[in-house]
Image: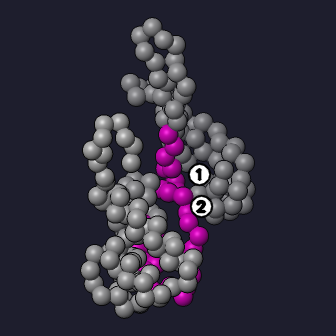
């Protein structure tokens, strides 16, 4: 596992503080101390056993929520990155575990601000701004390819395609 504080790879040596069962499953609170940064890691695990009336319990499904730190750390932002961008990035990392959609919105805002304020792209919708940046060769090829993937995935997420043929996966 990776320490959520310092991102160093460590052995998962978690110990259970307590357990409880409810209608959703079994809840465990675990802790361990990272041997690298010596900080405590507290996590909440939910294990669900899926079953039906005449069938044995199915495979357990686990969900892990970090209690402390609140989310997994990301690599620190370089001091060369202006605060207007690093603050959005840090906040996006902080809310990722609670709201992936809010995190994505902050990441989108950061990218759009970068394109408008540092690259000089005319304000439009983000897909058109990315396309303009790619077409005008503002970035090296590898960054343009990543931006295009963001544009395609963002468009699909915002405007999912519906199949006109039953059973067809798009």
- What secondary structure is marked by label 1? strand
Q: Which of 80 and 167 is in front in this view?
A: 167
**Cβ–Cβ under 8 Å for marks 1 and 2:** yes
The x and y percentages for residue 124 are 26, 80
Magenta segment: 63-92
Q: Is residue 72 magenta?
A: yes
Cα separation, mark 1 vs mark 2, equals: 8 Å
Which disc, if any, is residue 14? none
The mark that comes first in sequence, 1 or 2, is: 2
Q: Residue at position x 39%, y 48% from top?
A: 170
Q: Nearer the viewer, residue 61 or 165?
A: 165
Q: Mark 2 points at which residue?
A: 5
> In this view of the protein, can residue 84 be seen by the observer?
no
Q: Residue at position x 68%, y 45% from top?
A: 12
Q: Residue at position x 55%, y 80% from top?
A: 141
Mark 2 burial class by Cα count in 10 Å: few <14, some 14-19, many 20+: many
- Residue extending farthest to the top is 54
Q: Nearer the viewer, residue 127 or 25?
A: 127
Residue 157, quarter of the rendered image: bottom left
Q: Nearer the viewer, residue 40 or 132?
A: 132
Relative to residue 120, is residue 17 drawn left or right?
right
The x and y percentages for residue 52 are 43, 15
The x and y percentages for residue 136 are 43, 88
Residue 134, quarter of the rendered image: bottom left
Q: Name the residue under label 1.
A: 41
Q: Does the magenta stretch include residue 109?
A: no
């Amino acid at each position: 596992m990776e320490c959520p504080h310092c991102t160093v790879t460590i052995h998962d040596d978690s110990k259970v503080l307590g357990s409880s069962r409810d209608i959703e499953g079994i809840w465990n609170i675990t802790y361990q101390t990272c041997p690298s940064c010596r900080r405590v890691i507290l996590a909440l695990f939910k294990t669900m056993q899926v079953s039906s009336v005449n069938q044995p319990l199915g495979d357990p499904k686990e969900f892990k929520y970090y209690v402390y730190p609140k989310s997994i750390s990301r690599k620190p932002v370089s001091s060369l990155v202006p605060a207007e961008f690093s603050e959005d990035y840090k906040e996006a990392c902080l809310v990722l575990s609670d709201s992936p959609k809010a995190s994505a919105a902050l990441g989108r805002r950061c990218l759009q601000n970068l394109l408008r304020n540092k690259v000089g792209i005319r304000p439009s919708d983000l897909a058109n701004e990315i396309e303009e940046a790619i077409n005008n060769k503002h970035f090296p090829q590898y960054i343009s390819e990543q931006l295009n993937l963001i544009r395609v995935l963002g468009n699909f997420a915002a405007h999912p395609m519906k199949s006109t043929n039953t059973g067809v996966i798009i």
